[in-house]
Amino acid sequence: MVVGAERGGGARKTLPVLRRVVVAREGVTATGTVTAAAAVTATGMVAAAVTAIVIATGRRRDAMRHRGSGRGGVGGGCGEGGGRRMIVGATEGARSRMQASKLRWMVGAIVMIAAATATAQPSSQFLAEFQAGTDAYRLGQYAEARAHLERAMAIEPSLPGPPRFLAAVDAAESKWAECVGHARTAIIANPASSEIAATRKLHDDCRAALDRPAFTGDYADGGALAVETNIAGAVITIGGLRAGASPLPPKAMALGKVEVTASKAGWKTASGTATIIPGVVTDLELVLAEDPATLTIDSNPAVPTEGWVRVDAAAGAQITFDGAALATDDRGRYQLPVGVHDLEVTAPGYLPYRRSVKVERGQELKIVVPRDSTAGRAARRQKGMIALGAAAGLGLVGTVTGWMAFAAADDARDWAELERLRPTTVPLSETLAYAPLHTRAEIAARADRSRTLAIVSGVSVVASLAALGAGIYFLAKLPADAPVEIGPTVGDGWGVSIRGAL
Amino acid sequence: MLVSLLAFGGCAWFDDGAPTRACKTNRDCFAAQGEVCTADGVCEVTDAAAAAPREVPQ
């Protein structure tokens, strides 16, 4: 059976209700109708019967020999003839006893082998799960297949069938890394399996899907090892011997565990252990960590041709440069060519923000976008309108009361002047017809009223001015231009770049 | 407009005070009401002033 070819295609057919459960895999043959206990019992019965027959045959032969000698029993008789017959009889008896003993040992061995074989027979539960898993796989029911096969593997972890089928399920679901892992498990479980070729092919196909290089040499009786590192150019040693630089293509390797190290200047040495299995490539990935204690001096650093912009905006903001959304680098910066760019920032609940940004070569700009929300602006506008309204009202009050104060003061002055000019040669009653009489008390009262109205007018005017200022502040407040922080220019032209701790 | 109105109203705060009783001559007082300018320079109403003949040219 070629697992790879049976990747669920064309196998959607109704299974027969009654079927003989036969799993001819990996040297394990079981028939569902024959239990292990019955096999042991049958073998034991046969062995016992054979032993009994052998023993009975031996004794009968001994008895016949002794009867023919005229003597009974072993050890009887005298004289040379009798002695010879005794020796012959004893020899024959010993020989038959030896044969019986051998047969007993053979029977015992057969019984033990049968018992061991019976013990090695997989349980019915495993068979049920395994069969259900393979059936589900062929029907394309990969989730169900995976569940059955994983249970089967848990029951019998030493058998390669479940992991091999799990690898096929992984491949069907494009889970290439898991496929490689399960295929390795199947190969390790039984490298001499009748399905090993298909398992290896599945393993290699899944590796190829991961874009890993294939092994083009001869495995002989071993395997192969490939090494990758997170940084290229690391020196790879295998078993203490230098093997090349990463990424290291598959190299033929003897079976077993090997120690692998990867080292590079400026990075901490990484090491790992790989277990080489037969007929496939074992992949090992080592991660090197940067060594901050190392000082690296580059006398010819690359000249930057672009600059960077870092934008600090509200969460969820959409940031575009020249109308296009860009991706940030690993430091959260936007890399842009030198020149002027239009930055636009929009976020839900916030006012859109636009400005021009000038990017210099090798320079990093940081722009903090004001968090001017639409709700905040509406509230501010409302406050401004209220303040302006109050300013207008207070101003009106101040104006009216001021006018009234002026009028009252004029009345008091006019009355006083009138009374000073009222002639004394004309009877008072006659002058009253032209101008009413105003006593000093009335004039003083009018003057007091003028003073009071003036105070009210003054206070209203001051309050109105304050409200006017507040209204102008709330309505005319514009978001401050975003502060821009400019980082130092990074090198230009010839120079030395130093990286690391001093 | 608002500023001019406010300025108008504000000026009321600095208006002159009420007429006082200070005087130098009888003409500074309310003679028709019987006030005369006393030696202290204050307009006061007196009975004599109320009974004084009218100042007529004839």
Image (spheres, grey):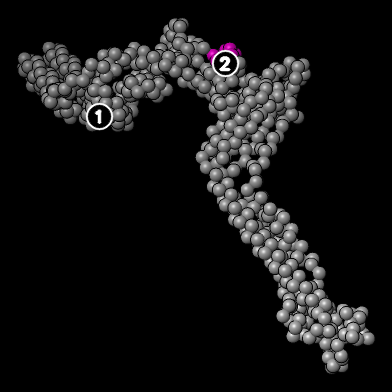
Viewer-closest of A118 and A436: A436
Q: Are marks 1 and 2 in contact (CB under 8 Å)?
A: no
Q: What percent of the width, then of the height, locates residue A222?
A: 44, 12
Is residue A375 in the magenta section?
A: no
**Mark 1 vs mark 2: same chain?**
yes
Q: What percent of the width, then of the height, locates residue A446?
A: 73, 76
Q: Say which residue appears at 72% left-offset and 55% top-offset.
A: B4
Which class describes the residues within 10 Å of circle 2: few (<14), some (14-19), or many (20+)?
many
**Quarter-of-image position of residue A467:** bottom right
Q: Say which residue appears at 7% left-offset and 17% top-offset.
A: A64
Q: Mark 1 belongs to which subunit? A: A
Q: Mark 1 points at which residue?
A: A129
Position of residue B52 in the picture relative to residue A434 (left or right) = right
Q: Mark 2 points at which residue?
A: A246
Asked whether residue A329 is in view, the answer is no
Front label number (1 vs 2): 2
Q: What percent of the width, then of the height, locates residue A438?
A: 75, 81
Which class describes the residues within 10 Å of circle 1: few (<14), some (14-19), or many (20+)?
many
Asked whether residue B16 is in view, the answer is yes
Q: Mark 2 belongs to which subunit? A: A
Q: Which residues, given as a range, are shown in magenta?
A: A241-248
Q: What element carries label 1?
A: helix
Q: Say which residue appears at 79% left-offset and 76% top-offset.
A: A418
Q: In the orientation shown, which residue stands out farthest toward the right?
A: B39
Q: Taken as a whole, is the magenta stretch helix, strand or loop?
A: strand
Viewer-closest of A478 and A307: A478
Above or below residue A270? Residue A348 is below
**Quarter-of-image position of residue A98:** top left
**Quarter-of-image position of residue A203:** top left
Q: Say which residue appears at 24% left-offset and 23% top-offset.
A: A139
Q: What element carries label 2?
A: loop
Viewer-closest of A6 and A35: A6
